Image: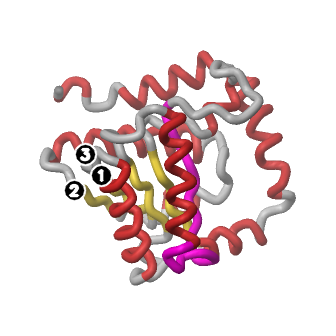
Amino acid sequence: MCWYHSRMKNPSDTETIIARTRCWIERVVVELNVCPFARKPYEGGQIRYLVSAADSPEDLLADVQTELELLRSTDAAEVETTVLIHPYVLNDFFDYNDFLGIVDALIDDGGYEGEFQVASLHPHYQFAGTQPDDAENYTNRSPYPILHLLREAELARAIAGYARPDKIPERNIRTLEKLGATRMREILDECLRIGDDQE
């Protein structure tokens, strides 16, 4: 099974947000092989989806810490990673990017260093040195702002079994440039239309 949990009041909103996020993970991250290490936990149902009701950075940081503690106390075979979706806070990419430094400080100061790391995903993600419409930005453009909590041991194990992981970004750029930003935007929009007939 795929784990999910919510601190939201409306279950239908939660289900729609998770469905849209799962669609993006399947169609972009897994099918396009943007992250070669994602297929196993995705197909094995070891991803936990948490939809946060946080509407302030402080509340979101508290959710991050709670989730890190939950991962620490849960066997990786049961839950390998958490996709923490936060639709109501840090929708501005630059605010989100600044918040990542606060999360890193929590990892360092909270005793999680060497155990967990956080990958960043956002609807307006932009890599340094790129233009907003460059296709390569879509490797990290998710339907909602997301903090992806990863176990370093599992990540290291996956990397060790993969030839030339340093070539992954280069390959991703080629793949997405071939598809083009227009097609990537269409895929994202298709995922975001899930549940529209219920609203």
Residue under the point 53% across and 74% down = 109
Q: Secondary structure at mark 3?
A: helix
Q: CA distance from mark 1 to mark 3?
A: 12 Å
Q: Amino acid at mark 2?
A: Arg
Colour setup of the view? secondary structure
- Tell me if label 2 and label 1 are in contact, CB under 8 Å: yes
Residue at image mark 1: 52
Q: Is residue 133 visible?
A: yes
**Disc 3 from disc 2: Cα separation:** 12 Å
- Side (left or right) of 54 relative to 162: left
**Magenta highlight on residue 116:** yes
Residue in view at x 43 percent, y 63 percent? 45
- Residue 145 spot, x, y in % from top left: 44, 41
Q: Earlier in the sequence, mark 2 or mark 1?
A: 2
Task: Identify the magenta region.
Answer: 109-123
At horizontal 68% and vertical 25% (from top left) the residue drawn is 135
Q: Which residue is mark 3?
A: 15
The amino acid pointed to by label 3 is: Glu
Q: CA distance from mark 2 to mark 1?
A: 6 Å
Say few, some or many: other residues with alpha carbon within 10 Å of mark 3 (under 14 / 14 to 19 / 20 or more): some
Residue carrying label 2: 7
SS at circle 2: loop
Nearer the observer: mark 1 or 3; the answer is 1
Q: Amino acid under label 1?
A: Ser
Quarter location, residue 150:
bottom right
